[in-house]
Structure formats: structure tokens, C-alpha cells
Amino acid sequence: MSKRIISAPPARTRPAPVSDRSTHSGSVPVTGTDGDSRPSLPRRLRDRVGLVALAYLGLCAAVLVWAVVASVTDDSGEAMALVFPLLVTAPGSLVVLVLPEHGSMFFASLVIGAAVNAAIISWCTSVLRRGRPDPES
């Protein structure tokens, strides 16, 4: 009795990943219906940036939404709520001090500050995840 080998059609195959090439050669069937097996954007973002940095970015977004709503609904004109997003994204958001005076520059400084801080958080978590090398080895 002969073995029947089932494989994907040639149009639905791609080269094997580098890590798999040592064990076998040939093609690996592509999963999914559209031939694109890339993970979704949130998954790629979480893998690249990290869960802690994404939580920080979510916190920044929540504080910004709260501050804008609090400032818009304040009738006295003395709301200081927009200071909190600057504090949450400091020190990177302090670039607002050198940017021209315009409403969009305030939000640009918040984006810059949040992105810089998220990159630092991502780097710190990746270093901590690696751990220290064993001193005896």
C-alpha cells in the first residue's frame, strides 16, 4: 500500500521559514483564505511594542480624552485639566515649550512624548524579560 502525500497547490505555498529549513526543504502551506498569514495589526503592535507600553499608551489616550472633555465643558475658562496629559507624557511632551503656539502643536507634543515614553518602556521590559546571564557560565 503506498502512502498518499497531501500538499497544498503550488499557488498556495511559500518558502519555509529560515528556522525550519534545517529540518526539511520545500514549501510550507499557507494558512488562511487570502494567502496572507500575517497576524492582525493589534497582535503585531503588541508583539513589537509590548503589553506594558500599550497599556501606557491607553492610559495616555484616556487621560487626554478626559482632559479635553473637562476643558470643553468648563464654563469658567480656568480649567487646568490639559496639564495632566503633559505630566503623563513628560519629559518628551515638554517639547511643547519650543514649538510654535498652535493648538495642533500641543497635541503633537503629546504624541511625541507618549511615543518616546512607550519606546523606553518597551526597551526596559525587553531588557528585564531577558534577565541576567548566569555568572557561573
Image (spheres, rainbow, N blue to C red):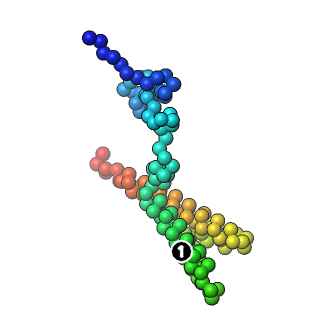
Position of residue 37 relative to residue 75, above or below, is: above
Q: Mark 1 = which residue?
A: 66
**Quick one: quadrant of the N terminus?**
top left
Q: Find residue 73 and report its horizontal and vertical position in percent.
A: 59, 81
| Identity of the residue drawn at 62% across and 86% down | 75
Give SS at disc 1.
helix
**Quick one: quadrant of the C terminus?**
top left
Residue 57 visible in the current orientation: yes
Position of residue 54 relative to residue 104, above or below, is: above
Q: Which residue is at the far top?
A: 1
Q: Which residue is at the far left?
A: 1
Q: Find residue 7 and report its horizontal and vertical position in percent.
A: 40, 23
| Identity of the residue drawn at 36% across and 26% down | 23
| Identity of the residue drawn at 72% across and 71% down | 102
Q: Nearer the viewer, residue 90 or 83?
A: 83
In the rendered image, which quarter is residue 112 located in? Answer: bottom right
Position of residue 32 relative to residue 21, above or below, is: below
Q: Nearer the viewer, residue 97 or 110?
A: 110
In the rendered image, which quarter is residue 24 located in? Answer: top left
Circle 1: residue type: Trp
Answer few, some or many: residues within 10 Å of disc 1's Cα (few below 14, many 20 plus, some between 14 and 19).
some
| Identity of the residue drawn at 60% across and 67% down | 110
Q: Nearer the viewer, residue 41 or 132?
A: 41
Q: Find residue 22 and report its horizontal and vertical position in percent.
A: 39, 27
On screen, residue 96 versus residue 67, left or right, reads: right
Q: Find residue 8 and report its horizontal and vertical position in percent.
A: 43, 24
